[in-house]
Image: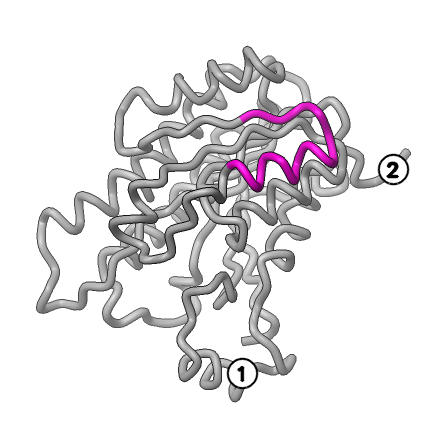
Amino acid sequence: MIALDLHDRVAIVTGVSRRAGIGAAIARALAEAGARVLITYYRPYDAAVSGLADPDGPEVVLADLRHLTPHVASVEVDLTQPGAAPAIFDTAQSALGPVCILVNNATHSERDGIDALTAEGLDRHYAVNVRGMALLCAEFVRRWRGGSGGRIVNLSSGQGVGPMPGELAYAATKGAVEAFTASLSAEVAARGITVNAVDPGATDTGWMSPDLKAHILAHAPMGRVGLPTDAARLIRFLASDEAAWITGQVIHSRGGS
C-alpha cells in the first residue's frame, strides 16, 4: 500500500483563485496523490480586497491539475452566501463523486486595527472565515456516508502563537476557526471523520513587501520564509490514511518561528 495514496477520493479545496496561492499548492498536492479535486474561487474578492488579483488563475490551476488527473472540476462561488455550501457539494458530487476530503482554505482578510474596527468589517470576515467554513463542515458531515477516511482540514493563522495587531477582525475569526476545529473533531470522531487545523505561518504567496520579507528572513530559524508547498505537503498527509489517529489538533507548521 502507498502511504499517501488518495486515488478514488474526492476533495474540495476552497479559495483557489491564484496560481501562487496556498490553495493552488494544496490542490496540486492532493491531485499528485491521486485525489479527484474540485476547486472553488471568487475573483471579485481578489480584485476588490486582496490586491492580488490573478484573473486567469483558476483556469491555469485547473489546466495544471488536468496534467495530473482528468478528474478535476471548479466552481466560482461567493462563500458569504448561505446557499454556497450545498451548491459546492452538489457540483463536486455530480462531477467527481461523494466527497471525503474538505480543505477550508478560503479566507477574507482586511487590515483594520482598533481605530478602524467596524461592524461591517467584522461581518465581512465572519461571513467567510467562520460562517462559510462552519457551513461547509456541516454539509460535509451531513453527506458523509460513514466508515473511516473522512477528512476536514481548516486553515488557521497562528492566533495562539502570537498577536496580530492591525488585523483584529481577521485574528478574531481565525481564532474561532481553531476553537471550532477542536469541538467539531470531538463531535464527529465516532463517525470516522478527523478534523484538524493547519497554521502555515508567514507564507510567501506574493503579498510580502521586500522590507517585510527581509524582516521575516532575519528572524527565521531555518533561514527562509514558508512556501505554499510546505502547507500543501502537511495537508496531503492529514488527508491520508497515515493521519487516521490525528484529530482536534492545530498544527503550527511555521519552520520554528
Image point 24% across, 63% down: which residue? 111
Residue 4: where, in percent of width, then height? 79, 40
Give the vertical position of 49 relative to 101 (above or below).
below
Kind of element beneath mark 1: helix
Q: Nearer the viewer, mark 1 or mark 2?
A: 1
**Direction from residue 215 to residue 194 in the image, left or right:** right
Quarter holding residue 193? top right
Residue drawn at point x = 52 percent, y = 36 percent: 59
The foreground one among 239 and 97 is 97
Pick the quarter of the image with the N terminus.
Answer: top right
> In the current view of this chain or complex, which residue is farthest to the bottom?
218
In the rendered view, does 111 fall on the left or right side of 22?
left
Q: Amino acid at mark 2?
A: Ile
Is residue 6 placed above or below 53 in the rendered structure? Answer: above
User: Is residue 221 positioned above or below 47 on the image?
Assistant: below
Q: Is residue 200 magenta?
A: no
Q: Which residue in the protein does label 2 denote?
A: 2
Marks 1/2 in contact by CB < 8 Å: the verdict is: no
- Residue 94 rendering spot, x and y as whole percentages: 55, 11
Range drawn in magenta: 59-73
Please give the name of the residue rendered at 50% of the width and 38% of the height, measured from the top-left corner: 58
The image quadrant where one finds the C terminus is bottom right
Q: Can the viewer see residue 182 in this picture?
A: no
Compared across the picture, whether 38 is left or right of 128 comes to right
Which residue is most to the right?
Answer: 1
Indicate which disc, 1 or 2, sits on the residue closer to the N terminus.
Answer: 2
Q: Secondary structure at mark 2?
A: loop
Residue 217's disc number: 1
- Assess disc 2: are there few (<14), some (14-19) or many (≥20) residues with their C-alpha within 10 Å of its C-alpha: few
